[in-house]
Amino acid sequence: MKSPVPFPPRRPLALRLIRPGCMAVAMSCLLAACSKPADAPTSAAAKPAAAYAAVARGRIDIEGGLLNLSMPRDGTLATVAVHEGDHVKQGQLLATLDTQPAKLAVDAAQAQLEQAQAQLKLLAIKQAAAGQRAKRLAAAVAAGAGDGQSADDAREAAAQLDAEQQADRAAQDMASQKLDEARYELRQRSLLAPFDAEVVRVLAQPGASVSPSSGPLFTLLPQKPRIVRAELNESFVGVIQPGMHAEVVADSGRDNARWSAHVLRIGNVYGPATLENDPQVRANARTVECVLAFDQPQELRIGQRVLVRFGAASTPAPTTSKD
């Protein structure tokens, strides 16, 4: 007779309940460990960064922009006195045209003026003599020793010479005006720097025929403070005010390229976004020009792209209710 197979001893009830609980705890820990890396980026992205009232694209400029100069008169360039990169002072010579025709006109006007002056001097001598003769004849007629007709003729001659003298004075004034005009035309053959500036571009060569309609020959960068022309989105127009602090950052992304500035003025005209890289955004966005001045003078290049971060956005303080 076979001996009965012994049954395995029954485990206590407490052990049977603990094992599933441990498995549940282990699964919970495993799920938490698996979900933690996925949640980490979300919490990192939710971490608040530096807040600004508005951010806008802008470019470096100066008041009035670059100055393009052309010769004010037609002619042939005789000299070009500057080169690209030169720094010029106000009134410094940039270029000259052939001045020979203008000098001849000045000489002719000068000769005409001298002729009018000589004629006026001669008439003054004649008028003085005629006036003296008329007085003598009038005195003789009064004394009964002269002819009345001769006295009348002398007075008429003196009056005629006086009228001719007045006409010659007018001719002298006209000759003087023509001389001034000829000298002005001579000065128009020379192009001078209107203010202190840097010569950015020279498109002129001696011997070339030029005219005011042939385009600019020189491009000057005036020595004026740099400004920022930012394109402020229409949604931020009511937030930004003149005098507001701003931070200007180079669009190249260099962290050390940043400058302090403040808002000078905000435009009253809406326009398209010309500095936006995305064509679709550029076509649909409406912006207002915002001009900023640097707190310290900067020697930045004209046309450089920048980002403007307007002052930190202020968060409203929590209100407390009073009992």
Image (spheres, helix red, strand yellow):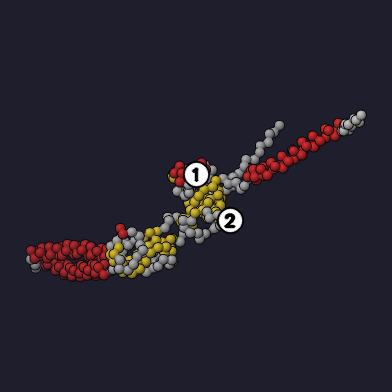
Q: Residue at x 54, y 47 (%)?
A: 55
Label 2 neighbour load within 10 Å: few <14, some 14-19, many 20+: few
Q: Classify residue 129 as left or right of residue 176.
A: left
Q: Quadrant of the N terminus?
A: top right
Q: Residue at x 42, y 55 (%)?
A: 64
Pinpoint residue 170: horizontal percent, then vertical percent: 21, 62
89 relative to 256, above or below: below
Amino acid type for the residue under numbered disc 2: Asp
Q: Which mark is residue 295?
A: none
Identify which residue, 126 or 18, lies in the foreground.
18
Pinpoint residue 271: horizontal percent, then vertical percent: 43, 45
Label 1 neighbour load within 10 Å: few <14, some 14-19, many 20+: many
**Residue 180 in view:** no
**Residue 255 in view:** yes
Q: Residue at x 57, y 48 (%)?
A: 311
Q: How far separated are the C-alphas under marks 2 and 1? A: 24 Å
Q: Residue at x 35, y 68 (%)?
A: 80
Q: Which mark is residue 233?
A: 1
Q: Classify residue 270 as left or right of residue 106.
A: right
275 relative to 90, above or below: above
Identify which residue, 115 or 275, lies in the foreground.
275
- Marked residue nearer the N-terminal end (2 or 1): 1
Question: Helix, strand, or loop for circle 2?
Answer: loop
Pinpoint residue 261: horizontal percent, then vertical percent: 54, 53
75 relative to 10, above or below: below
User: Given this view, does label 2 or label 1 mark the residue nearer the observer?
Assistant: 2
Q: Quadrant of residue 259?
A: bottom right
- The residue wearing badge 2 is 255
Amino acid type for the residue under numbered disc 1: Asn
Pinpoint residue 99: horizontal percent, then vertical percent: 28, 68
